[in-house]
Amino acid sequence: MAHGRIGFIGAGKMATAIIRGWISAGTVVASDLCITAPSDRNTRPLKEEFPDITVAKTNVDVVQRSTIVFLAVKPHILPIVAAQIKSRVTPAHLLVTIAAGATTAQVEAMLGPATRVVRVMPNTPCAIRCNAGAVSGGSNASPADIETVCNLFAPLSADGTAPDSVPDSLMDAVTGVAGSGPAFVLTFIEAMADGGVYAGLPRHIAAKLAAQTVMGAAKLVLETGEHPAALRDAVCSPGGTTITGVRALETHGLRNAVISAVAAAAEKGGHLR
Ligand code: NAD
């Protein structure tokens, strides 16, 4: 248990995705984990899935039982939680915030200027060990603190590599691409499946083909290291079906829609603070 006991304040979707990923990777065991949320109703699903998890009674209880404390609540709840735990956070604690929009400086200001804070922006595919995300260290986070968090997240990525460490000022952009990105890609997959149904395929076949196609295209980018445009050009035969579809995408503004979605999500992150 090189990482010490890990606490989660907040036991919702993102906490669940991270915990599922760790336990399926075998890098964190349930008995190392302590969670809390305002009522048993909120912690019950995780406790039922992983009975060895400790459910703490209060947020302060989690801090007292853990060396690494994840702040896994919605951004507007952070100040409430910080006010509760501030007097119990010591230099021995490493605080990991996953809240969209909240900078490490803001979390330090809420918890005390000496607090060791690392910010992570993960995404829900953590649960199946396909995370995309990045980390940034606060002013008191040592390189070892950042490494600790990177080591926790490396087994949650598809290739086992640690997330990139970026300046805090880029974390809203990471939120736009990775944190919010699964929703954009899922919308694309759904639309592609609708296209398949329109062209005559049964829904279940169209949906599977759309998801497999997105996964295959993503793997091509990651495994060849080639530019996406080069890979796309390679499958566009002159006068063929694919270039005809690409023209339709451009006519209907897919590229601009996607850029606008990422930019809007990143900008919203800045407005959450
Ligand atoms: P969620 O609503 O599913 O979970 C929030 C949890 O906080 C719940 O368990 C809730 O009971 C608990 N909670 C509420 N008030 C609390 C309090 N006072 N003390 C302790 N716990 C309290 O939300 P989520 O999607 O898991 O998001 C959590 C954080 O993760 C957010 O800040 C979000 O920005 C960030 N995040 C989410 C995603 C995502 O895709 N869901 C991706 C990246 C980052």
Image (cartoon, grey):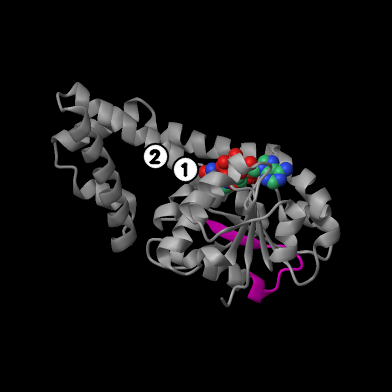
| Residue 260: image location, x then y, percent | 50, 34
Q: Quadrant of the N terminus?
A: bottom right
Q: Which residue is drawn at 52% across and 50% down?
A: 46
> Given contact means CB atoms under 8 Å apart, are the residues at marks 1 and 2 in contact?
yes
* Amino acid on which disc 1 is placed: Gly
| Residue 14: image location, x then y, percent | 54, 48
Tell whether position 91 is magenta.
no
Seen from the viewer's position, the closer of residues 14 and 228 is 14
Q: Residue at x 32, y 36 (%)?
A: 189
Q: Is mark 2 on a helix, strand or loop?
A: helix
Q: Is residue 194 above or below residue 153?
A: above
> What is the magenta range?
132-145
Can you identify the residue that label 2 sits on? Answer: 185
Residue 242 located left or right of residue 252: left
Q: Is mark 1 on a helix, strand or loop?
A: helix
Q: Is residue 61 above or below residue 183?
A: below
Q: Does the residue labelled 2 lie within 8 Å of ligand 1?
A: no
Q: Residue at x 43, y 37 (%)?
A: 184
Residue 252 located left or right of residue 62: left
Task: Kindly identify which numbered label has been placed on residue 181.
Answer: 1
Seen from the viewer's position, the closer of residues 107 and 136 is 107
| Label 2: how many Cα within 10 Å (few below 14, some 14–19, many 20+) | some
C-alpha distance separating marks 1 and 2 = 6 Å
Tell whether position 139 is magenta.
yes
Residue 114 located left or right of residue 173: right
> Residue 192 is drawn in which quadrant?
top left
